[in-house]
Amino acid sequence: IHRHGSLLLQSKDTLGIVSAVSGVILKHELNLTGADLHVEKGNKRGEAPDHDTFICRFSFEAKKSPTNNSSSFAFDDADSTESFEVQSFEEHLSRIVASFHAEATLLHQSGRFVKFDGTVEGQDSQVRKEVLRFHGPARIAVFVSKRDHCLNDLLDQCRGGELPVQITRVISNFDRTEDNSHIFRALSRLNIPYHYV
């Protein structure tokens, strides 16, 4: 189910990018829940890039039902494809990516992961689209040092369903053994391998 997700977009800093992406999100009856913006200043010494680079992560979710004050969404799993057309949403986003000669990645809650490349040379308003994963959680490795609090938080978010990823291994430069680490014991219970490097 594609109830929420995020779009990471990078392009030459140009007016109208946020407005265009926000318009697509609104057109598909989604709420824009966050937009983290950053502008990387171009190199002043004549080296590439010779322009400012705009980077933004847009977060979105399906609108909540206006007739219900609970946290449930306006559609359930059975009719989600009627309420939110993934292909149409991605087609509109690809037009925006092409028009700004941008690069973008789109990650849905369902695990669908799509890459757009609108920087194709010599092809005006074209975008290369590649579905990197159709569904399911991303499989990740976590790098951790001596302190455990960040890893604890990630594990809690995964178990609670807040972070839709599967942690396949933990890699660290700190040697934890069963005797000296509650994290090592927790990872063992979850069948997550621990690698000391």
Image (cartoon, rainbow, N blue to C red):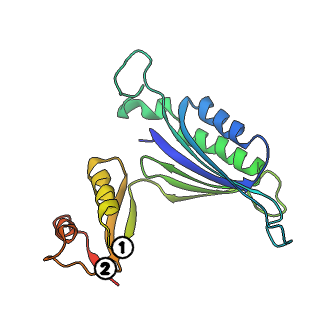
Which quadrant would the N terminus be assigned to in this image?
top left
What residue sits 53% from the left and 32% below the top? 31
Q: Is residue 98 above or below residue 28?
A: below
Q: Is residue 148 left or right of residue 184?
A: right
- The residue that disc 1 covers is 145
Q: Amino acid at mark 1?
A: Ser
Labels 2 and 1: the sequence-earlier one? 1
Residue 120, image x and y in percent? 76, 62
- The residue that disc 2 covers is 174
Residue 38, image x and y in percent? 66, 52
What residue sits 34% from the left and 76% below the top? 171
Residue 96, image x and y in percent? 71, 45
Q: Residues within 10 Å of mark 2 (few under 14, many from 20)?
A: few
Label 1 residue SS: loop
Residue 160, image x and y in percent? 27, 47
- Quarter holding residue 92: top right
Q: Residues within 10 Å of mark 1 (few under 14, many from 20)?
A: few
What residue sits 79% from the left and 50% below the top? 125
Say which of 56 and 90 sits in front.
Answer: 56
Q: Residue furthest bottom?
A: 197
- The reply to whether residue 102 is in sight is no
Say which of 75 and 163 sits in front.
Answer: 163
Q: Is residue 2 left or right of residue 184?
A: right
Label 2 residue SS: loop
Q: Amino acid at mark 2?
A: Phe
- The reply to whether residue 184 is in sight is yes
